[in-house]
Image: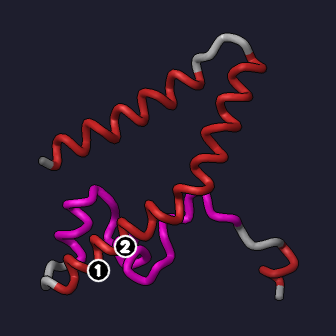
């Protein structure tokens, strides 16, 4: 069953590879814009779904290390997911003024 989902993720990755290989630069840019717009709307939902899975495993007593192994991520990433910090990929970084305080 997990292998089926891995295959689904692989198909998404393959589709993104095909977008990168579009010969015409303008058509490629249009396709990339569509992908990025779609990602912007889907990313929060995907992060929430992943967090729900981590929280459910933690509620079942599964260790951080086992969750990390199941998800193929680092221990720190699992802890960040649990706290709701996500992966950081695709999230907006704070401006320099905000960082400097």
Residue 34 falls in which quadrant of the image? Answer: top right
As drawn, the label of residue 51 is 2
Q: Disc 1 on helix, strand or loop? A: helix
Q: Disc 2 on helix, strand or loop? A: helix
| Magenta region, residue range | 64-92
Residue 56 falls in which quadrant of the image? Answer: bottom left
State the residue position of label 1: 55
Relative to residue 61, is residue 67 depicted above or below?
Answer: above
Relative to residue 34, is residue 59 depicted above or below?
Answer: below
Relative to residue 71, is residue 84 depicted above or below?
Answer: below
Query: What is the x, y in percent for residue 17?
Result: 50, 26
Query: What is the x, y in percent for residue 95?
Result: 81, 72
* 100 to the left or right of 93: right
Magenta-colored stretch includes residue 75: yes
> Residue at the top extreme?
23
Residue at 66% across / 47% down in the picture?
A: 37
Residue at 64% across / 44% down in the picture?
A: 36
- Residue at mark 2 to residue at mark 1: CA–CA distance: 6 Å
* 10 to the left or right of 69: right
Query: What is the x, y in percent for residue 26?
Result: 78, 20
Which of 34 and 10 lies nearest the eye of the viewer?
34
Kindly indicate whether the residue at mark 1 contacts the one at mark 2 (C-beta within 8 angstroms). Answer: yes
Residue at 53% across / 56% down in the picture?
A: 42
Q: Residues within 10 Å of mark 2 (few under 14, many from 20)?
A: many
Magenta-colored stretch includes residue 73: yes
Q: Quadrant of the C terminus?
A: bottom right
Query: What is the x, y in percent for residue 90?
Result: 60, 57
* 95 to the left or right of 47: right
How many numbered callouts? 2
């Amino acid at each position: 069953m997990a292998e089926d989902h891995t295959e689904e993720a692989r198909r998404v990755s393959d589709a993104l590879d095909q977008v990168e290989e579009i010969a015409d630069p303008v058509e490629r840019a249009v396709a990339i814009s569509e992908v990025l717009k779609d990602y912007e709307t889907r990313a929060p939902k995907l992060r929430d779904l992943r967090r729900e899975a981590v929280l459910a495993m933690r509620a079942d007593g599964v260790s951080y290390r086992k969750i990390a192994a199941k998800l193929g991520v680092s221990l720190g990433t699992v802890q960040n997911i649990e706290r709701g910090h996500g992966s950081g990929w695709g999230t907006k970084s704070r401006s320099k003024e905000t960082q400097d305080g």
